[in-house]
Image: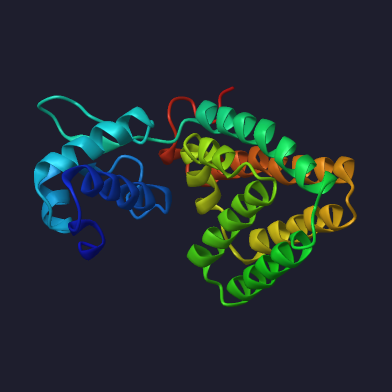
Amino acid sequence: MAASVLDGTEETISLRVVTALRDEIVSMALKPGDVISESDIAARYGVSRQPVREAFIRLAQQGLLLIRPKRATVVKKISPEGVRQSRFIRESIEVEIVRRVAAHPGRDAAAVLGALIEDQEKASAANDSRKFHALDELFHRSLARLAGVEYAWQLIDDHKMQLDRVRFLTLGVSSAQRAIAEHKAIAAAVAKADPAAAEAAMRAHLARAEVLLAQTITDFPEYFEGPAGAP
């Protein structure tokens, strides 16, 4: 992983460290409660401590790390309220995105979404959860691109880390197949140029977050803040 962060200015190296660490936290390679240090991360990535320090500060601002002066830095536990707020932000924006795509799908929309769903099915068949997660992200990012508002996806991406951690904990063959079926419903509504159906399909898809949250709180209570699952 060091090779992916070594090149560039100190600022770009810091951003790469942020991306790499965020991926480790979201994918549960670094679990809630794990202790990390600037020196260990700097040695692992082959960089100086300064960009690591900057990355820690940014990840703390995003709610993924808890920096305690003169004490260990730890990976924060998942906030149930943070997951719920992430879902609210995501649904509010993505519903408008999918309505815009369905209102004017263009000639490429059905083909683009169909090809992504085929790739998701292959990743699911191979039980490759990491690849499936990336393709799931790409499906939603592609909707924003087709709508001509790809920056809107960046806004979503900046606020959905807690939700992503829950999603990664629940990725498996059955959950992947359900997600694929829901993606197909969204794609079908877009192909029919039916904004109302596309909105309903997207809302149903994103509503799964609450079910997944309850499931992970039950299965991994030690990963959550406070009284697990308290509203």
Residue 37 appears in the rendering: no
Of residues 163 and 195, the one nearer the viewer is 195
Apparent side of residue 178 relative to residue 66 in the rendered image (left or right): right
Apparent side of residue 177 relative to residue 19 in the rendered image (left or right): right
Eyeballing the image, is 173 above or below 175? below
Q: Residue at x 18, y 48 (%)?
A: 9
Of residues 95 and 84, the one nearer the viewer is 95
Q: Residue at x 73, y 37 (%)?
A: 95
Q: Residue 225 appears at what percent x and percent y?
A: 43, 29
Q: Quadrant of the N terminus?
A: bottom left
Q: Residue 41 appears at what percent x and percent y?
A: 17, 50
Q: Quadrant of the C terminus?
A: top right
Eyeballing the image, is 39 above or below 71? below
Apparent side of residue 198 relative to residue 226 in the rendered image (left or right): right
Quarter of image, res 120: bottom right
Q: Residue at x 44, y 35 (%)?
A: 78
Q: Residue 28 appears at what percent x and percent y?
A: 39, 52
Apparent side of residue 130 relative to residue 172 in the rendered image (left or right): left
Q: Residue 192 appears at what percent x and percent y?
A: 90, 55
* Total numbered labels: 0
Eyeballing the image, is 216 above or below 155? below
Q: Residue furthest top?
A: 231
Eyeballing the image, is 193 above or below 65? below
Residue 105 appears in the rendering: yes
Of residues 181 and 7, the one nearer the viewer is 7
